[in-house]
Image (spheres, grey):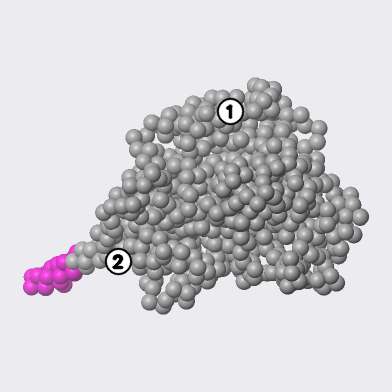
Amino acid sequence: MNEDENKGIIFQHMIVHRDIKPVNLLIDIDKGILKIADFGSAKIVQRGSYSTSYQVTRFYRPPELLLEAKEYYWMVDVWSAGCCVGEMMAGKVLFPGASGKMMLKLIVQAIGLPSQRDHDYMKVSKMIDPESDVKVKGFKEILGNVKDEWADFIGEILRYRPRERLHGPKLLAHSFFDNIFTTKCTLSNGLLVSQVITAEDYKIALKNDCVSGRKYATMILRNEVKFSLKDSNRNANVTPIAASKDSKENKESKDSKESKETFLIPVADEARKNQLGVKLTKDVVIVEQDEIMSSQTLVVDDHMDAMWTIDTHEPNFEEMFSWFHRIMELSCDNFLRNTEVFDLMRSKSFDVAILEPLSVCGLGFFKKLGIEKTILASSCSLYDFILPNIGEPEEHSYVPSLSSQTGDQMSLFERYKNYRFSKETKQTMDKMFDQETRIYRKHLGEDLPDWRELLPSASLFFTNSNPYLDFPRPVIQKTVPIGGISVNMKKIKSEKLNSNWDRILDEREHNMLISFGSMVKSSQMPFEWKENIVRVIKSEPNVTFIWKYETNETQFAAGLDNVVFSNWVPQTALLNDERLTAFLTHGGLGSTNELAHCGKPAVMVPIFGDQVRNANMLARHKGSIFVLKNDLGSFEILKKAVHSILYDKEYKKNAKHLAEILSNQPHQPKDLVVKHTEFLAQFGPFPKMDPFGRSLNFFARNFIDIYATIAFSYLTFGFLSLVILRQVLLLFGVS
């Protein structure tokens, strides 16, 4: 190696990337090449130099940067790379902390508390409390079902002391790599395969049958996709979805049976960007938050915690969800600022585009791409704030709105309140949609139509509503109910509980699951409510309560032997198990659909949003009991509800009957989605399905002009009759 080459290598080793993460790793499977992309945060670092600690995407940020170290080197990239490899193994982000503090807690759970010496090696300005009470899990538990040597490999990379992180030749000599290169394989020049593997080494080794890991490289890539698609919660912020066109070549290819969809995800909530819920789609495009958005965005969980105590009985939608509107506007701006995404989508050929109308940003994007066949898809059973725009009737007198606090049988005041909830929600969403229109026009062109024109141009509207479960209401032809599409009963019935859950369920005659979902955490519930739930649990010694609880801080239930706390539960498997007697839930639509299909009686305690509507919806079928969230503080009310749902057999009977109806319904939701989408792709768009009625004014739509004309006619006739009668009477001398 000459002097210039030597200087070049030394210079390269002075560069710290400072943003290693899966989306910045480019893999060429056929050539066996891995390249690192996006050097926007990279910096040349020399000894004695200082740098900002606010670098590296949070999930991949090493502990020294979380503790605000100013002097660091390339070992921060080794930590990030270790997180990427671990993510591929586990199928999920290793440290999905919503804040720096939560990140440190998750890291401590993985590798234990750092010593004073560890802090010194990291050269940090802050320290982790050495007395912190954190249960250490270790990488074997965090990674899940992986080989011991894999967990050991990640553990040797992810260490507190930067210089002790496994790297270089020692890293490549680890047994983890044994199945990639054949032992003692020589190249064509007679030399052994080099320890630092170059692209040329790979080509020669491949030619000489020295590589046994070609399938492994493919598996890593698939896992990299898979960790983005693995099991997820139902409240991911996903907009929009686009279904791509099948060309003649595609239909004739071997892969013609594979799905041809593109899943496009602008990241609105960084903490949930991997909760996609996609299982079959191979083409997934994630639009990451840039530095501008990262510096402005809000932490969703901080606002969710407040939902426990916010009064949802008053229509203050704008005040309650102003943070959500801000996040959606920032996300729209961030999404459209990335011109590479538009160019990528334009290079594809799409027949149909689908999005959820919680945002209209995607509608402007689709219009600019020239996609005319669009579908709206609602994750809730009713998005009443768009009904006037698509021409669907609003019936406030007997159809509960999205945020309504009542069922379909309302008093005079309740009907007025239902109307106010609906109108305030619409006014607030209209403001957000107007702002998003300004944003998509700024990025894509001022000539793009307003959202009020784009929304009704959608040919279909999929709603997460089931006619056999939901409140009856009038709909237009383009509305297709697909409620329960996420509930796969065949899969649920095949799920097996492990021996630990079997033991828990066998311990007592009755069992009750308690879960408030993943958005609002039980751990953030007001303490007096937790204490009251514990009192109710204590009053039912013959019942085992399984409580999904996010932390290990459960001292408030100390001494109780009939409650099991777990930060994760196999919810669907438990709901399908006959040994589970009942479910205490928040009434999220996902959980509501699951327990309805499984035929499980429930106590529903809605916290916010559409959950009150869902609870009232299910209570109509007399298989559940509705309890206000503030009544979690009332022992008498909660005790009565829990005892009734456990021992009154009528609730179980009615819940089972509803499950039978849903399992035997004539049209399955998945069939409706597939057939309608394919039909639209082949014959759409359908502008004639846009009802003329949406353009009518209030008076014409509600026959007020007709009633007024009839009333005027009667009044005129009556007046003229009186005038004539008076004149006749005067003729006869009657005054």
User: Label 1 neighbourhood size at 10 Å, few (<14), some (14-19), many (20+)?
Assistant: some
Where residue 439 sits: x, y (%)?
49, 73
Which residue corresponds to mark 1? 496
Q: Magenta residues? A: 714-735
Q: Residue at x 63, y 31 (%)?
A: 512
Comes first in the chain, label 2 or label 1: 1
Query: Residue 557: percent from the left, percent from the top?
Result: 77, 37
How dense is the environment of label 2, judged by Cα within 10 Å: few (below 14), some, or many (20 and up)?
few
192 or 582, which lies in front? Answer: 192
Membership of 292 in magenta stretch: no
Q: Nearer the viewer, residue 78 or 117?
A: 78
Q: Which quarter of the figure has residue 663?
A: top left
Callout 1 secondary element: loop
Q: Amino acid at mark 1?
A: Lys
Quadrant (top left, top right, bottom left, bottom right) of the C terminus: bottom left
Report whether 114 appears left or right of 614.
Answer: right
Q: Which mark is residue 695?
A: 2
